Amino acid sequence: MAWRIVKQPNGLLARFSDIVDDFTHQNMTEAEALEICREYLGIVESEKKVLAGVQDWKPWTNGVLGSGLDRWNESIKTIKSVHGQKTAEQRVQADSPRRDGMNKCEVCEEIIDGGDMCDDGVYRCVGCAIEDGFDIQTGNPV
Ligand SMILES: [Zn+2]
Protein backbone atom coordinates (compact mmCIF):
# COMPACT_ATOMS: atom_id res chain seq x y z
CA MET A 1 0.00 0.00 0.00
CA ALA A 2 1.99 2.94 -1.27
CA TRP A 3 -0.75 5.46 -0.65
CA ARG A 4 -4.07 5.79 1.12
CA ILE A 5 -7.10 7.97 1.46
CA VAL A 6 -7.19 9.77 4.80
CA LYS A 7 -10.14 11.39 6.52
CA GLN A 8 -9.33 14.90 7.72
CA PRO A 9 -10.69 16.44 10.91
CA ASN A 10 -12.95 18.65 8.76
CA GLY A 11 -14.54 15.55 7.23
CA LEU A 12 -12.99 15.97 3.80
CA LEU A 13 -10.42 13.56 2.39
CA ALA A 14 -6.72 13.64 1.67
CA ARG A 15 -4.43 11.31 -0.25
CA PHE A 16 -1.27 10.34 1.63
CA SER A 17 1.67 8.93 -0.32
CA ASP A 18 4.28 6.68 1.30
CA ILE A 19 6.62 7.57 -1.55
CA VAL A 20 6.90 11.24 -0.59
CA ASP A 21 5.69 10.71 3.00
CA ASP A 22 3.28 13.56 2.51
CA PHE A 23 -0.20 14.43 1.32
CA THR A 24 -0.48 14.82 -2.43
CA HIS A 25 -4.08 16.07 -2.20
CA GLN A 26 -6.15 17.59 0.59
CA ASN A 27 -9.75 18.73 1.07
CA MET A 28 -11.31 16.36 -1.45
CA THR A 29 -14.92 15.26 -1.45
CA GLU A 30 -15.65 11.54 -1.72
CA ALA A 31 -16.34 11.99 -5.44
CA GLU A 32 -13.04 13.79 -5.94
CA ALA A 33 -11.16 11.13 -3.98
CA LEU A 34 -12.78 8.41 -6.05
CA GLU A 35 -11.68 10.17 -9.20
CA ILE A 36 -8.08 10.26 -7.95
CA CYS A 37 -8.21 6.54 -7.07
CA ARG A 38 -9.56 5.74 -10.51
CA GLU A 39 -6.34 7.08 -12.03
CA TYR A 40 -4.55 4.13 -10.44
CA LEU A 41 -7.15 1.46 -9.73
CA GLY A 42 -10.26 -0.27 -10.98
CA ILE A 43 -13.65 0.81 -9.71
CA VAL A 44 -14.00 -1.89 -7.03
CA GLU A 45 -10.56 -1.23 -5.58
CA SER A 46 -11.14 2.51 -5.78
CA GLU A 47 -14.41 2.35 -3.90
CA LYS A 48 -12.77 0.20 -1.24
CA LYS A 49 -9.89 2.65 -0.96
CA VAL A 50 -12.23 5.61 -0.46
CA LEU A 51 -14.37 3.65 2.01
CA ALA A 52 -11.24 2.81 4.00
CA GLY A 53 -10.56 6.53 4.25
CA VAL A 54 -14.11 7.56 5.03
CA GLN A 55 -14.43 4.91 7.76
CA ASP A 56 -10.85 5.53 8.91
CA TRP A 57 -9.73 1.91 8.84
CA LYS A 58 -6.67 1.59 11.02
CA PRO A 59 -3.50 1.88 8.97
CA TRP A 60 -2.39 -1.48 7.52
CA THR A 61 -5.67 -3.26 8.31
CA ASN A 62 -8.58 -4.46 6.27
CA GLY A 63 -11.75 -3.06 7.79
CA VAL A 64 -10.65 -2.42 11.38
CA LEU A 65 -12.31 0.88 12.26
CA GLY A 66 -10.13 3.53 13.79
CA SER A 67 -11.11 6.44 16.00
CA GLY A 68 -11.99 8.55 12.97
CA LEU A 69 -8.64 10.30 12.99
CA ASP A 70 -6.15 7.42 13.20
CA ARG A 71 -4.98 7.80 9.62
CA TRP A 72 -4.81 11.57 9.90
CA ASN A 73 -2.77 11.44 13.12
CA GLU A 74 -0.46 8.78 11.67
CA SER A 75 0.04 10.87 8.51
CA ILE A 76 0.78 14.08 10.40
CA LYS A 77 3.22 12.18 12.64
CA THR A 78 5.04 10.86 9.57
CA ILE A 79 5.12 14.30 7.89
CA LYS A 80 6.50 15.81 11.09
CA SER A 81 9.28 13.25 11.43
CA VAL A 82 10.25 13.30 7.73
CA HIS A 83 9.65 16.95 6.75
CA GLY A 84 9.68 18.75 10.09
CA GLN A 85 7.32 20.59 12.38
CA LYS A 86 6.69 23.50 10.01
CA THR A 87 5.48 21.36 7.13
CA ALA A 88 3.27 19.35 9.49
CA GLU A 89 1.72 22.59 10.74
CA GLN A 90 1.02 23.73 7.19
CA ARG A 91 -0.80 20.47 6.48
CA VAL A 92 -2.89 20.89 9.63
CA GLN A 93 -3.68 24.48 8.67
CA ALA A 94 -4.81 23.35 5.22
CA ASP A 95 -7.50 21.34 6.96
CA SER A 96 -9.79 24.33 7.13
CA PRO A 97 -13.50 23.71 6.88
CA ARG A 98 -14.78 23.98 3.36
CA ARG A 99 -16.65 27.26 3.38
CA ASP A 100 -20.32 27.43 2.66
CA GLY A 101 -20.81 28.49 -0.91
CA MET A 102 -17.53 26.90 -1.89
CA ASN A 103 -19.33 25.45 -4.89
CA LYS A 104 -20.98 28.77 -5.52
CA CYS A 105 -19.43 31.87 -7.02
CA GLU A 106 -19.65 34.58 -4.37
CA VAL A 107 -20.01 37.29 -7.01
CA CYS A 108 -22.64 36.04 -9.46
CA GLU A 109 -23.96 33.36 -7.07
CA GLU A 110 -23.98 30.72 -9.75
CA ILE A 111 -23.42 27.13 -8.69
CA ILE A 112 -20.14 26.13 -10.25
CA ASP A 113 -17.96 23.09 -10.59
CA GLY A 114 -14.64 24.86 -10.78
CA GLY A 115 -13.55 28.20 -9.50
CA ASP A 116 -10.98 29.65 -7.22
CA MET A 117 -10.38 31.56 -4.06
CA CYS A 118 -9.02 34.86 -5.28
CA ASP A 119 -6.37 36.93 -3.56
CA ASP A 120 -9.01 39.02 -1.78
CA GLY A 121 -10.51 35.90 -0.18
CA VAL A 122 -13.58 35.88 -2.42
CA TYR A 123 -14.50 32.65 -4.18
CA ARG A 124 -15.17 33.33 -7.85
CA CYS A 125 -16.16 31.41 -10.95
CA VAL A 126 -13.80 31.65 -13.90
CA GLY A 127 -15.90 34.33 -15.61
CA CYS A 128 -16.08 36.59 -12.56
CA ALA A 129 -12.39 36.09 -11.79
CA ILE A 130 -11.47 37.27 -15.27
CA GLU A 131 -13.98 40.11 -15.11
CA ASP A 132 -12.68 41.30 -11.74
CA GLY A 133 -9.08 41.07 -12.89
CA PHE A 134 -7.82 37.93 -11.16
CA ASP A 135 -5.73 35.16 -12.63
CA ILE A 136 -7.90 32.07 -12.19
CA GLN A 137 -4.85 29.79 -11.87
CA THR A 138 -3.14 31.70 -9.08
CA GLY A 139 -5.95 33.87 -7.70
CA ASN A 140 -3.60 36.83 -7.87
CA PRO A 141 -4.61 40.16 -9.40
CA VAL A 142 -3.53 40.30 -13.04
ZN1 LIG B 1 -19.34 34.27 -10.97
Image (tube, rainbow, N blue to C red):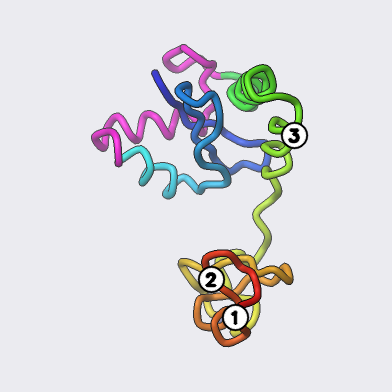
Crowding at mark 2 (Cα within 10 Å: few <14, some 14-19, many 20+): many
Q: CA distance from mark 1 to mark 2?
A: 17 Å
Helix, strand or loop under label 3: helix
Number of residues whose C-alpha sits closer than 10 Å to that of mark 1, classed few (under 14), some (14–19) or many (20 or more): few
**Real-space Cα distance between discs 2 and 3?**
27 Å
Q: Quadrant of the C terminus?
A: bottom right
CA separation, marks 1 and 3?
A: 33 Å
Of residues 117 and 138, the one nearer the viewer is 138
Q: Which residue is mark 3?
A: 89
Residue 122 in picture, x, y percent from top left:
69, 72
Picture residue at 54% right of the left edge, 75% below the top: 125
Q: Which residue is mark 1?
A: 109
Task: Magenta stretch: give its range.
Answer: 39-65
Q: Earlier in the sequence, mark 1 or mark 2?
A: 1
Relative to 40, say whether 19 is above or below: above
> In the picture, residue 79 is in which quadrant?
top right
Q: Residue at x 67, y 19 (%)?
A: 77
Q: Nearer the viewer, residue 54 or 80?
A: 80
Write down the quadrant of residue 85 in the picture.
top right
Provide the residue designation for mark 2.
Answer: 136
Q: Is label 3 within 8 A of ligand 1 (CB to nearest ligand atom)?
A: no
Residue furthest to the front: 142
Distance from mark 1 CB to nearest ligand 1 atom below 8 Å? yes
Task: State the residue in front, 17 or 106.
Answer: 17
Which residue is at 33% across, 34% downward? 46
Q: Is residue 54 left or right of residue 89?
A: left
